[in-house]
């Protein structure tokens, strides 16, 4: 049904063409799901954009052949390509907030392809048909309150709801091929499972072929029939998912399927460096109206918890459960709280954020960024020496001092963020989803680096994540948050092997690729099954 032959994509660099996709060939049978896996920069997304015809105006060179049934796409004019974009080929992108138009209502965006391809008449009857088809598409992707969502804007929806809107937009013309480019990467584990289940259902009901791009092998394993492994623009391995992932042949594939790093032998002491009692944390919200009034919304409710010296404590839960809010209260970024929060004076808690690109100032060099918290305490010479020493400690070198964040890879930027947190002699590191935005190989490197720092500097760490598998490998204990409440706390292996609370069981079931155990009651936390 779909075939790529000798596809290459190259961009001009220093007067020469630099290949980012290098002579790849593959095919996809009708009604199948083909996974494409590889680290950032391997050429996955460039392959997808070339197939969709979205690279023509980016100053790049695209060569080879792409066939959709009997149509050769790359030889088409822009006008001809526009006739199949959205109708026969459709794409779901990684971050719906940047892919959806922020000033256009959802209904208009979802129905846009029907209008562009003249699949709806322009008269009054056509407008009503358009509305009904958009509402049906929204309901099909699991958005029950379709009438309300139709008139809303993207910022009024959650991340999972926005991704469902993107899928509705892509599927409304019933395309032959759907390209899903990292559609679950930015979502927590429960919403991720729901989106994967939705894609499987649409695939079964409509018979649409899917090219599914991801760096997450667990996701690829759950949804795909076959898989291609890309490395430095080339396909290095391909075959049935179970065969490739169980018995990898290429060295790079073997590194992808390697186990996560394990925490070392250092055990926490019995001394509690942080004690939290009956903590309630609030956010102030402004109500709409002529005279906007502030209201307080409780995000964390009656939380009691201790963190011990040298411990790596994992905090897990879905988006909105209060994980980051707890971190901000501990670091003093949110002081709207009630209850007791006591910590040792020498801790100096510091945060490492999820996305280093948005947390590092793009207008300044790495040296300037790292020196910023040292300016009042050290001379220029001392600051330079300390920063260069830290660059060595985090696995880089002094040459990075004069570089800018956009000149670094995702893993290098995250190392800089960790270095910035440690420059103030912090003994307490809070890693807030610090590896969730990284591809699988860089993720393993950063985890290993954090564990190395934990042993070398005798750090105490709060490791926030929605991935129970990662938390299990590197944390001593796990605390599970659900709707602002602490619902489970215990030894990492014990929680993983014998979860007590229904919500923890749900997290584990979707993480292992099992069927959902049912809806969770918002008050009791009990499962409907």
Image (cartoon, rainbow, N blue to C red):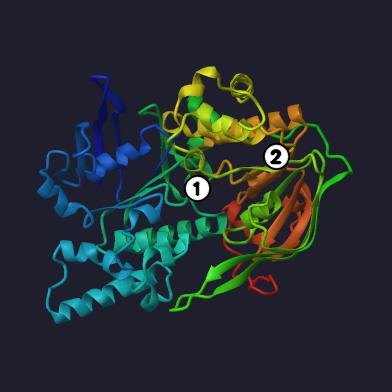
Q: Are marks 2 and 1 in contact (CB under 8 Å)?
A: no
> With 356 as the anchor, is 124 left or right in this view?
left
Where 504 falls versus 105 (above or below)? above
Q: Which residue is mark 2?
A: 474
Disc on res. 219? 1
Label 2 to label 1, Cα distance in Å? Answer: 21 Å
**Which sits in the foreground, 438 or 336?**
336
Count of labels in the image: 2
Q: Residue at x 37, y 37 (%)?
A: 44
**Which sits in the foreground, 381 or 230?**
381
Q: x, y percentage for residue 314?
A: 70, 48
Evaluate whether residue 358 shows in this view. Answer: yes
Q: Residue 487's quadrant in the figure?
A: bottom right
User: Callout 2: helix, strand or loop?
Assistant: helix
Disc on res. 476? none
User: Callout 1: helix, strand or loop?
Assistant: helix
């Amino acid at each position: 049904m779909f075939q790529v032959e000798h596809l290459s994509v190259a961009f001009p660099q220093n007067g020469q063409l630099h290949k980012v996709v290098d002579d790849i060939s593959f095919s996809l049978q009708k009604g199948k799901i083909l996974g494409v896996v590889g680290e950032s920069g391997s050429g996955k997304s460039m392959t997808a954009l070339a197939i969709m015809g979205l690279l023509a105006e980016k100053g790049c060179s695209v060569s080879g052949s792409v066939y959709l049934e009997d149509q050769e796409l790359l030889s088409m004019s822009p006008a001809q390509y526009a006739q199949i974009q959205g109708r026969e080929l459709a794409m779901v992108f990684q971050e719906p907030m940047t892919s959806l138009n922020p000033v256009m209502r959802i209904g208009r965006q979802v129905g846009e392809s029907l209008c562009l391809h003249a699949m709806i008449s322009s008269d009054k009857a056509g407008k009503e048909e358009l509305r009904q088809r958009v509402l049906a598409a929204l309901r099909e992707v699991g958005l029950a309150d379709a009438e309300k969502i139709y008139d809303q804007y993207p910022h009024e929806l959650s991340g999972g709801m926005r991704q469902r809107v993107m899928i509705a937009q892509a599927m409304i013309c019933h395309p032959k091929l759907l390209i899903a480019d990292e559609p679950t990467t930015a979502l927590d584990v429960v919403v991720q499972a729901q989106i994967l289940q939705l894609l499987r259902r649409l695939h079964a009901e409509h018979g649409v072929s899917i090219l599914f791009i991801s760096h997450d092998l667990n996701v690829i394993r759950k949804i795909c029939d076959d898989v291609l492994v890309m490395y430095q623009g080339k396909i290095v391995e391909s075959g049935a998912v179970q065969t490739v992932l169980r018995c990898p042949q290429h060295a790079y594939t073997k590194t992808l399927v390697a186990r996560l790093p394990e925490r070392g032998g250092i055990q926490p002491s019995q001394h509690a460096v942080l004690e939290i009692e009956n903590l309630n944390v609030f956010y102030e919200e402004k109500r709409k109206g002529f005279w906007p009034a502030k209201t307080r919304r409780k995000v964390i409710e009656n939380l009691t918890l201790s963190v011990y010296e040298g411990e790596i404590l994992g905090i897990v839960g879905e988006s909105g459960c209060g994980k980051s809010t707890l971190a901000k209260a501990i670091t003093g970024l949110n002081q709207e709280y009630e209850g007791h929060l006591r910590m040792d004076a020498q801790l100096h808690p510091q945060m490492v954020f999820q996305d280093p690109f948005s947390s590092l100032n793009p207008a300044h060099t790495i040296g300037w960024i790292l020196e910023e918290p040292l300016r009042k305490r050290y001379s220029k010479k001392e600051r330079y020496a300390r920063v260069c020493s830290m660059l060595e400690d985090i696995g880089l070198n002094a040459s990075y001092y004069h570089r800018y964040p956009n000149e670094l890879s995702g893993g290098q930027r995250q190392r800089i963020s960790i270095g910035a947190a440690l420059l103030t002699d912090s003994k307490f590191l809070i890693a807030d989803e610090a590896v969730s935005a990284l591809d699988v190989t860089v993720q393993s490197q950063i985890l290993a680096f954090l564990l190395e720092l934990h042993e070398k500097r005798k750090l105490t760490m709060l490791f926030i994540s929605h991935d129970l598998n990662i938390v299990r490998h590197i944390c001593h204990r796990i605390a599970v948050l659900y709707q602002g409440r602490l619902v489970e706390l215990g030894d990492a292996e014990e929680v993983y092997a014998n979860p007590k609370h229904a919500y923890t069981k749900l997290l584990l079931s979707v993480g292992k690729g099992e069927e959902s155990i049912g809806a969770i009651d918002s008050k009791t936390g009990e499962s409907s099954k």
